[in-house]
Amino acid sequence: RKEVEQDPGPFNVPEGATVAFNCTYSNSASQSFFWYRQDCRKEPKLLMSVYSSGNEDGRFTAQLNRASQYISLLIRDSKLSDSATYLCVVNRVNRDDKIIFGKGTRLHILP
Amino acid sequence: EPEVTQTPSHQVTQMGQEVILRCVPISNHLYFYWYRQILGQKVEFLVSFYNNEISEKSEIFDDQFSVERPDGSNFTLKIRSTKLEDSAMYFCASKQGSGSHNEQFFGPGTRLTVL
């Protein structure tokens, strides 16, 4: 099983739709979780950290289910500018210096 | 807003040649990283560096790779004898402090092409 696994995508959704990204991780003792966004040929940029209680930032909501080793990201009222690849990122046990990236899910928002 | 910078943006080299990729982390950051991303694949951790020494490295980071912080501002990645499979985007990142929820800030990357 891959350390961090995401929906392969791509997702093609109309502007204004709600989009959900799913991610699972294999190491039950992983400690920190993040969603990054990567535009084509650009560097990854942190979108949001994911906390145990779940967290929201505007149109973005992240959830963590430790029992299922599952992380999600919801984007509401999607905009054209949301088109990017969304990367699920997990830190290794006792290795807060080393983060493991999922392969990413590409999102295309259609006008 | 402070940012991580990397030079060059694109490096083309012949197989077997040495390359040095340069990074200037954010000035008050203490933790430094290199990652690579082969085209169409995921971002992969190479090495982390703290207090002037490597704190962790991946299985990718073999004897052909080395890192250095020569002058307190630059952070370099050297590949001694490049192979075709080293062609990738190389991202430098830095982080201010320890703690798993501290954000790593990424530079724009250097695209390395090995011919």
Image (tube, grey):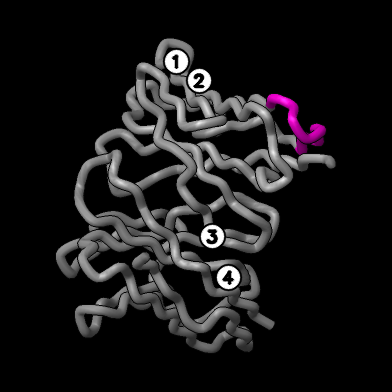
Identify the secondary structure beneath mark 4. Answer: helix
Residue type, mark 2 in image: Tyr
Mark 3 vs mark 2, foreground winner is 3
Q: Mark 2 points at which residue?
A: A70
Residue type, mark 4 in image: Asp
Q: Mark 3 points at which residue?
A: A43
Q: Give the range drawn in magenta.
A: A10-18
Q: Is residue A19 left or right of residue B6?
A: right
Residue type, mark 3 in image: Glu
Q: Tell me if label 1 and label 2 are in contact, CB under 8 Å.
A: yes
Q: Is residue B27 left or right of residue B105?
A: left
Residue A65: mark: 1
Identify the secondary structure beneath mark 3. Answer: loop
Q: Name the residue under label 4.
A: B86
Whole-angstrom CA distance, mark 3 to mark 4, is: 18 Å
Whole-angstrom CA distance, mark 3 to mark 2, is: 25 Å
- Toward the right, the furthest residue is A111
Whole-angstrom CA distance, mark 1 to mark 4, is: 37 Å
Q: Could you tell me which chain the residue with mark 1 belongs to? A: A
Whole-angstrom CA distance, mark 3 to mark 1, is: 28 Å
